[in-house]
Image (tube, rainbow, N blue to C red):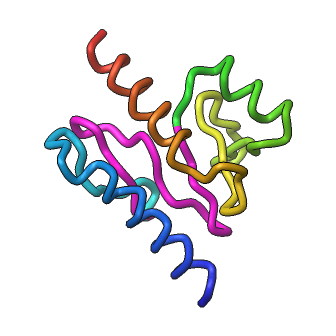
Amino acid sequence: MDEATAGREALDALAAEYADDPRVRFGTMFRSPGLRVDGKIFAFLGHGDRLIVKLPRERAVALMAAGVAGDVTMGTRTMKEWVALPAETPGGWSGYAREAYAYVSALLAG
């Protein structure tokens, strides 16, 4: 199985965890499949079979410092609240997606 297929299958499995949540829909971010809560992306599949999630800046910095996640650069700009998690992330992607969902939901609530 190639990376794109493996990554998409992992994302589909992640999406299944939100099947009963009417606020969550599949969407795209930079032409990549992802998950939206109330229309805002909180997780999407990035290049190289990585899950890209939006987290509070402090949490993102801590995950990168611990070597769990990498930064996300779009062009020449490093995205401060987005981190990239490899497919081999210890414990999987689910917990990080839940954190991203909660963070984006809180931002939307104001």
Expressed as whole percent of the image width and height from the top left, the position of residue 31 reads 42, 64
**Residue placed at 69% from the left, 46% from the top?**
73
Residue 74 coordinates in the image, percent (x, y):
63, 48
In this rendering, would 97 be left or right of 22?
right
Q: Which residue is drawn at 30% across and 56% down?
A: 27
Q: In which quarter of the image is residue 34?
A: bottom left
Q: Nearer the viewer, residue 54 or 22?
A: 22
Specify the principal SS of the magenta part.
Answer: strand
Where 108 sits versus 18, above or below? above
Name which residue lies at 73% across and 41% down: 71
Magenta residues, start to end: 32-53
Q: Residue at x 85, y 30 (%)?
A: 65
Quadrant where the N terminus is found in the figure: bottom right
Looking at this rendering, what residue extends furthest in the left direction? Answer: 22
Q: Position of residue 62 (x, y in %)?
A: 76, 25
Observer-nearest of 8 and 17: 17
Res. 59 image quadrant: top right
Image coordinates of residue 87 in percent, x first then y, are: 66, 62
Q: In this view, does 90 lie above or below 67?
A: below
The residue furthest front is 91
Q: Dividing the image into 4 quarters, which one contains the C terminus?
A: top left
Find out whether residue 60 is within the magenta segment. Answer: no
